[in-house]
Amino acid sequence: MVTGVKIIVLSSLDTSCRDAGLTHLQRHHPEAVTLSYDFIEGNRLVRRVSGNASAEYGEAVLEHPCIGCAVKYEIFPSIQRLAPRDPDAIMLLGLPATWHSGSVLQTLAEKLEATGINVHSNALSFDPTDLEDQMWDRHTLWESGFSSMEQDLRTPGEYFFTELMQADTLIPVEGMQTQLLEPKDSPRRDGGADFVAGLELAQHLAPHATVCHHENTLGSFSYEAVQQRTQAGHIPPFPRHGASGQVPIRLHAERPLHPQRFREALSELAASCTCLRGRLWVASALSERVAIGGAGPRIWMENTGSWSAEIAASELLLYGSEHESTQITKVFEDCQVTEDELQELLTTAPPATNNTHSQGGE
């Protein structure tokens, strides 16, 4: 058993940012063993080893494009084989572009714990100057060239919606376009106005995360905390103040929402929002907790089952919204049912059933 070895897991939307993030970590951990992967056509998982280990290149062909299989048959065995024998040694694990770290760690963390290897930090490497545009990108990851899987229908914004909550560390880097095409005094360069604004947006969307920029300041991985942050309908702690004084607009309704009125108001509520998170209490499904999420142009809802310990209420956080807070708050409050409307809905509602696939919050 290898005891005391710590792994820093690094995810990214694209390989250039992933590699730049690994370079950043290698500067602070020159003795680390670096293991990075790319997933390419033909279900091939390409392995590269560098740093404090013999250089290595290899491919594993997976029967299915499944993260669980990749971890079980390639990633975990490689970590076991390459893990340094020195206590407190560091390994860097660079994941394939677009892979969610949470999906990997769900399988990997338990296996590592049995070997005495611990996940030290879960980091996300990204180019701040591209973040807002990527949140608004309507194309799928495959259409945008980030994923080799045509059936991957996620957008870049959906990737960041989840990954910003999974990561405990943010590593801002210059992307390939900036490195190759931008002059040294470009606002897209590290320290430039666009770079700083994009980093502030990332901190706005992930207030829990530690920023690892010029120094080696890392967050601390906690599987329980990740599960809580990524739970459908989770409301992150509302910051008292944000980067550049920005804070999300918080909308709260103590009465149920009228389904038709909320449906009609949703486009106005979500307009200009880079991201939205929340949970809904809808009058047509009073016992059901409905999670709502949004990244740029996409909005989705999910019936998460009955309200448990939470007090039934609707709450939304609108990130990056250009709305006037008082105006949009009034729009949301007007979605609530009146007493007469609530009684009418209760009277005309169909009998409750045990159909577990029914959806509330139309």
Image: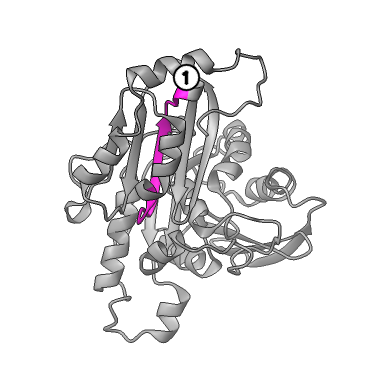
Whether residue 218 is visible:
no
Can you say whether 308 is above or below 77 in the image?
above
Q: Residue at x 40, y 18 (%)?
A: 342
Whether residue 158 is visible:
yes
Can you say whether 4 is above or below 137 in the image?
above
Where disc 1 sits, the SS reads helix
Q: Residue at x 30, y 34 (%)?
A: 334
Rendered image quadrant of residue 235: top left
Q: What amino acid is found at the position of numbered circle 1 in the picture?
A: Leu
Q: Is residue 199 or residue 346 the one in the foreground?
A: 346
Residues in magenta? Answer: 270-283
Q: Is residue 244 or residue 63 the one in the foreground?
A: 244
The percent position of residue 226, horizontal first and vertical second, equals 46, 36
Q: Residue at x 53, y 17 (%)?
A: 348
Q: Quadrant of the N terminus?
A: top right
Counting other residues with Cα less than 10 Å from the Cα at mark 1, is it few (<14), some (14-19), or many (20 or more)?
Answer: some
Q: Give the residue number, with chain letter if any, for mark 1.
A: 345
Q: Is residue 231 or residue 274 the one in the foreground?
A: 274
Which colour assignment does the render follow? one colour
The percent position of residue 183, horizontal first and vertical second, equals 33, 87
Q: Is residue 22 left or right of residue 173?
A: right
The percent position of residue 78, horizontal first and vertical second, equals 67, 51
Can you say whether 344 is above or below 238 in the image?
above
Q: Residue at x 71, y 57 (%)?
A: 151
The percent position of residue 20, horizontal first and vertical second, equals 46, 68
